[in-house]
Amino acid sequence: MGFVQLVLLEGVLLLSAGMIFFGGIWGTVAATVALSGINLFVHDLTQFWSWEIPLLFWGMGGMILLLIVGRIANKSQVVTGLVGGLISLVLFGAFITPIVAIILWALVIGTGIIPKTKKSQVLWSFAPTILRLILGLVWIIYGNILTL
């Protein structure tokens, strides 16, 4: 496989991780479809199914886990706008220098992220975001192993 193809595949993997992080369950569905396309692109039909079955299994497991953690986080009445706040941090950082972006984000969006002092509520408020980060990293690693 050529260098340009590897760079393009890595771009698709990073896009898939972004879809998982920002899209949640639907992003995970889209990332699973994207990885299935990469799998079809790099393997013949006999090897395709040996990689596709674990991909679909772990994709469904990730979606179910996101659903469960999201429901638990919403039941404990924690902040639900954390992902929106992180998106605004990325947007501020894209157009403003990073130091000014972090200060503006903290002043505009970041205030009130942790509303209660209970550790369990703070943990559950960050659990969906942390799970999305982990799933995105797993998809990038799995996709890189897939293209070997």
Image (cartoon, helix red, strand yellow):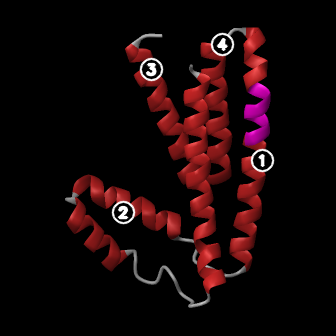
Q: Nearer the viewer, mark 2 or mark 1?
A: 1
Q: Nearer the viewer, mark 3 or mark 2?
A: 3
Q: Does 1 sit above or below residue 63? A: above
Q: Quadrant of residue 44?
A: top right
Cα separation, mark 4 vs mark 2, equals 38 Å
Cα separation, mark 3 vs mark 1, equals 28 Å
Which quadrant would the C terminus be assigned to in this image? top right
Neighbour class for label 2 at 10 Å: few (<14), some, many (≥20)? Answer: many
Q: Are marks 4 and 1 in contact (CB under 8 Å)?
A: no
Q: Does 90 sit above or below residue 71? A: above
Q: Amino acid at mark 3?
A: Leu
Q: Secondary structure at mark 4?
A: loop
Mark linked to residue 43: 4
Residue 53 magenta: yes
Q: Quadrant of residue 126?
A: bottom right
Mark linked to residue 6: 3
For marks 4 and 3 on the same chain, the one whose residue lies earlier in the sequence: 3
Where residue 56 appears, x then y in whole percent? 76, 34
Residue at x 69% of width, y 73% of height: 73
Residue at x 22% of width, y 66% of height: 99
Where residue 116 appears, x then y in whole percent? 57, 89
